[in-house]
Amino acid sequence: MLYRLSRFLRDHYVIWQNLLTWGGKKKEKPGNGQQFSNTIKSLPHFSVSPLSSSFKFQLTPQALLSLCLLGAEFTRSSMARNKEKLVLLLDVGPSMHSVLPEVEKVCSMLVEKKLIFRKNDEVGVVVFGTEETNNDLTKEVGGYDHIVVLEDIKVVDGDLIDTLQKLPRGTVDGDFLDAIVVGMDMLIKKYKDIHKGKKRLCLITNAVHPIKDSLEGTKEDQVETIAAQMTAQGMKMESVVVRGRLSQDANKRIMDENDRLLSIFSKQTLTRTVYVDSPTSLLGALKTRRITPVTVFRGDLELSPDMKIKVWVYKRTQEEKFPTLKKYSEKAPQTNKFATHQVKVDYEYKTVDGASKVVPPEQRIKGYRYGPQVVPISAAEWDAVKFKPEKGVKLLGFTDASNIMRHYYMKDVYLFIAEPGNTRAILSVSAIARAMKEMNKVAILRCVWRQGQQNVVLGVLTPNISQNDKLPDSFYFNVLPFIEDVREYQFPSFNSFPVSWQPNEQQQKAADELVQMLNLAPSGKEEALLPDYTPNPVLERFYRHLELKSKQPDAAVPPLDGTLKRITEPDPELFFENKSVIDALRKHFELKENPKLKKSARRLLREKPSGSNDEDGDADVSDAQAVNSIEKALVVKIEKIGDLTPVQDFEVILSRRDSPEWVGKAIKEMRDKILGLLSDSHEGDNHLIAVECIAALRKGCILEQEPEPYNNFLRYLNLYCQQKGMSNFWQLLASRKLTLVSKSEAADSDVTDNEARRFFVKTEPKPKD
Amino acid sequence: MDLDPEDVFKDEEDGSDNEFFQQSASSKEYVVYLVDASPKMFNTTCPGKDQKDETHFHLAVSCIAESLKTQIISRSYDEVAICFFNTREKKNLQDLNGVFVFNVAEREHLDRPTARLIKEFDCLQESFMREIGSQYGIVPGSRENSLYNALWVAQALLRKGSIKTADKRILLLTNEDDPFGGLLGAAKADMTRTSLQRAKDAQDLGISIELLPLSCPDEEFNVKVFYADLLGLDGEDLVQFMPSAGQKLEDMKDQLRKRMFTRRIIRRITFDITNGLSIQLNTYALIRPAVPGAITWLDSVTNLPLKIERSLICEDTGALIQEPPKRFQPYRNENVKFSMDEISEMKGISTGCLRLLGFKPLSCLKDYHNLRPSTFVYPSDQEVVGSTCIFIALYRSMLRLKRFAVAFYGSSSHPQLVALVAQDEVAKAGVQIEPPGINMIYLPYSDDIRDVEEIFPDTDDDAPRADEDQIQKAAALIKRIDMRDFSVSQFANPETLCSTAGSSSRRR
């Protein structure tokens, strides 16, 4: 019985709402009683059920009563013009449990940002799919089970975050349409029909469970009436539907039905429906900070002096920067409760001569650099030469889209829309945009957004054909560079490279495979890392840290969690699926550190004239840090020869290429290490290691073609062993044939092969025979 | 007017942003233009428009003049010297014959360009024959070798400063591919040997010598005859050496002008393709907004620059704050404090390299996916051999399959998702217009993208759409105002022009 009642109410919700809405209208036009009764009579199903008639009499006085409050609300509403009233409708049913951590995060972030940027916004929280039921509608009319109002609509506060951070885990499959009705009811009860456009519902669900059937009409009919009501009330909705990998086992038929129902909202109301299939895009799909759009320009888009279209220009992208935090002063005594802890920044302009006198503002003049000289130009003079273009947006012409390379886009992006309400303008923009799209053309514009603005902007207008029936066609506008902004460096053509640098057929095939298989936008699935749904991990981290710190001032910076790592690191799943492709790539391409970078070769490379291949010539000016990062990727950065693995350390340092000094450093370190080993040796316990080190040193010196250091060291060792009476060590060296490096091993050596061979014989401290 | 507006809005944390757009003084460049002034440079002309032929000498000088004008605005820390060889008169510290170092008052020989240098250099063409004169310095039978002398003088000029902080270059402009061609036997061998040795000495000091050859109408400049040895080009490099193509004046001018720029690397980065496959890339800023002349405050009485001292004062106590203060964010009725270390830790979310995440079709890169100017990426085998090969393979695959790579670029100041878009080489009349390589396009995050639904006003009705007839009319209009040959950077920024004109006129 209760169920039927609930269904019935949903079907007739509209009637009830119409009464309220109508009441609002009545207030504006008093004495229109006739219309009132006509409306009632015209309502369908009104007399069909006895239930509804009793219902009517319950509600109408309520509606009328509420009208009395409207006058007050209206005046207040102008002040609260930009305050958003939001109800979060969160599906917490069992199939949602796996993504609830992300839902908690994104919702807390939303409230956190409101606490900082929009303190007066009001938010309510509804969860559905719970065991329990607690909402006004269920009390008033029954039905609407398994829906709990966690927080009534109220001005945002910290408690709200606490609530959102521990959402209940539900036990029942929720009905999202019931939840929408509950949310609408809350908004209507609280704000009546004022604050149009500022009331918002935000639904997060996977929509994999069927909504309950309607007693009368189809589910589509139900949704349509609710959608109509939403529009009438000036409510907007944002629905985030969590799908794909996150809802594998769901019934396709039900999902399709739900999708169809949800699409009715997108078509008939201002609803943004977003499908996400990863926790990462769930974090990005919900706009956590709403910035009231401001026009950059309102005026004519001049196609020619006598052909103009009225347009409004907005920013389409604008970087949300890391918040500028205020400086904190710790000078005020702790006891001072009213201390602001603010810091004032003071600037003093002083003469550079010894006196360091402060120069008053009226004695200062601006100077402009021209080469090494500074040219003083007074404000008045500057005004005379200053470039003062007239405000306006003028068409320079149309051109093929292929003439404008994508990488010439210079800045954040603008959106040109036709003046709202101006049908002629909307049609003109639509016609031109569609024609441009068909012909693959773009338009070049010259823009001066404001009067008095000093700079002119040159840019490209591209068509943006609307996919949504409610939204008109529009244009994107991207700023293009002027001549001065472009550096026309020349780079060698890849075809001119030697064959050894060109990929062969198999290599090209391996690369093709990778480019094809490592696909982030597979057909039929959600595009991964779509900028529109990818949150800024640094900002996510800041707001999480802020919340942590507000509770625990010494909280450490939280690590990037797995969800955010999907933005900064490759998706292990995707890379695992394509393991064979990646392995093939690894097999076909070989990377090694440049072996030619020996001391002599290195010099040549560095000084090779820039006319041919000047990356090398520029090596010294480039960022040393970046070079280090390359090294880091290749080997663990080792700068000293340690005790544990002296041979390996030596080899690593020797092969470092970020500075020519490393070879010399490695050899010197190794020599010191060997002598250290010998002097620290107790009864020859270090001798074996020392011999290994000497062997490594010899090998390294031959590899680097540096015979001198080794030969000199060996000669020194000879003396050292004689002095210390370490003949057994010397014999060890002889047995390993670690003799002088000869000419045939390193060209620069002054030791002949014969000399090298005889070295141990000749120098044996205690010859055997 | 109490504060310098530029300073007020400058936050310490924004420093990295400025670095993105501006060149720092530490990576400056010392350039000596070494211009051949031999009679051959004056006798050879290249055909220009309207029968206005220009001599090679004129071409060289006007390109240098143009480059100086760009430099004084955009790279004013760089220092230049202009030096002619094969001249009648001599003027150089070494007092060598046939070499003339051009300079103006109040300026060292190798110094930042000044307005006066530009102005007088502009007038040089008229007075050149009278004051400097053209004369072969390499004469059979004499031991004079003006090329040798010129390299010596250039090297001496570049003795200034350390190669660690400055990039030193000699730009040699000549149309003679065989300077000792008129000589025979031992004399030729001797001069060749000494000149090559001179060049090698200069190169050993870290000076790079670049050749900007001018081809004569009837024969192409053959770098192999002599200059390949002088420049140290062999095998691979010789193939890469780009001979000047095209005979037309405009093309040659264009080519010279482009070659006068050095390709300045902004960063060397590692591109992690998969674990264990990391290649080396160099990044270049090919497109950055030119910042019109920086403002300095002067004392209007003395015209001397002023120094700006910033002090931090505690608002509660008035005390001066010495140590870098903590930062705070008011939140939930209290001030949440952050140390600078914590702030940089929060921003440091990646290792600083570029990590490949996957590929998408080009159609996924929307027109509104943009925030900042792009960065050009070109491979280098200098550190990691094989980098270029993988790069070319991926580059060709992306071009062919019309896909771009998505990667995460973890720079410490601005970690960001980027699109790597392959750009095919484009050349017109032998002049490279688009270099081959990959452009890195910085993608916005969802936080940076404004909702369209917010922008469009609420309506109950569907938006009006143009019908086929209206679209056809628009198409006709588009055809009428079509700019067929439009290319980016045809236009100079009127603002920069204006301020430069103001500054130069003021100088006089």
Image: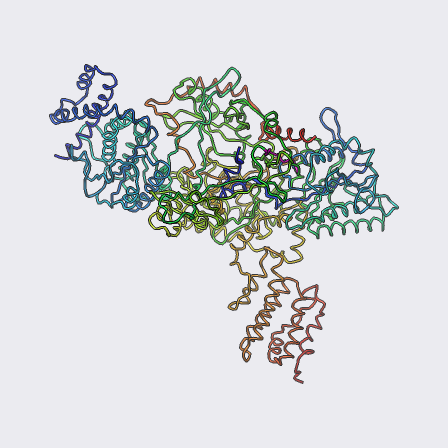
Tell me if residue B417 can be seen: yes
Q: Main secondary structure of the magenta part?
A: strand
Name the colouring of the figure.
rainbow
Q: The magenta stretch spans which residues? A: A363-371
Displayed quadrant of residue B308? top right
* Image quadrant occupied by the N terminus of chain A: top left
* Image quadrant occupied by the C terminus of chain A: bottom right
| Viewer-closest of B88 and A460 | B88
Locate residue A486, reporting x and y percent.
Answer: 59, 35
**A364 sits to left or right of B231:** left
Residue A366 magenta: yes
| Viewer-closest of A49 and A232 | A232
| Viewer-closest of A503 and B121 | B121
In the rendered image, the residue lying farthest to the bottom is A769
Locate residue A139, reporting x and y percent.
Answer: 16, 35
**B40 sits to left or right of A683:** right
Locate residue A437, reporting x and y percent.
Answer: 47, 26
* Image position of A447 with respect to B103: above or below: above
